[in-house]
Image (cartoon, helix red, strand yellow):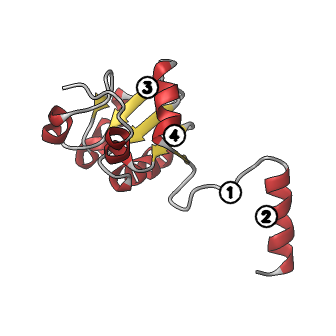
Amino acid sequence: MRPAITVALTAALLAGCAPKSAGGDYRNVSVTDLKAAVEGGAAVLDVRTAAEFAEGHIGGAANIPLDSLGARTGELDPAQPLYVICRSGSRSAQASALLVGAGFRDIRNVTGGMNDWQAAGYPVAR
């Protein structure tokens, strides 16, 4: 790494500004972070298919499948913090980048997705 980049990165980390996610201006969070946020009333967007959502989801989550999200961003509040989840974290990362590109300001991609949520023993609605 070149010295100027190292200095800039170190300064950003010391200032409490972590580098942005590679896929866009969103933050990656764990299911543990999501669980605490859900208990506090956070908005959750599940981007899996309707069939996957019906098999089990986080209570209160909205379901807009990734393949229709671009046409349905108007259903969401771009100023509200939004946690985005899928099965494993891949589609939610794509959705997070799409939402950032559409002007959303506080997007959090849930790494590990519903796989990690269920593995942790957290509640699932059907």
The residue at 15%/36% (across/down) is: 55
Q: Which residue is mark 2?
A: 9
Decide: marks 1, 2 in contact (CB < 8 A)? yes
Tell me: residue 86, above or below residue 19. Answer: above
The residue at 35%/34% (across/down) is: 121
Identify the image quadrant of residue 69: top left
Decide: marks 4, 3 in contact (CB < 8 A)? no
- Of the residues under marks 4 and 3, which one precedes in the sequence? 3
Decide: marks 3, 2 in contact (CB < 8 A)? no
What's the residue type where badge 3 is placed? Ala
Q: CA distance from mark 4 to mark 3?
A: 10 Å
Q: Which residue is mark 1?
A: 19
- The secondary element bearing badge 4 is classed as strand
Give x and y (percent) for residue 126: 18, 26
Decide: marks 3, 1 in contact (CB < 8 A)? no
- The secondary element bearing badge 3 is classed as strand
Q: CA distance from mark 3 to mark 1?
A: 24 Å
The residue at 51%/40% (across/down) is: 107
Label 3 neighbour load within 10 Å: few <14, some 14-19, many 20+: some
Tell me: residue 8, above or below residue 83. Answer: below
- Of the residues under marks 3 and 1, which one precedes in the sequence? 1
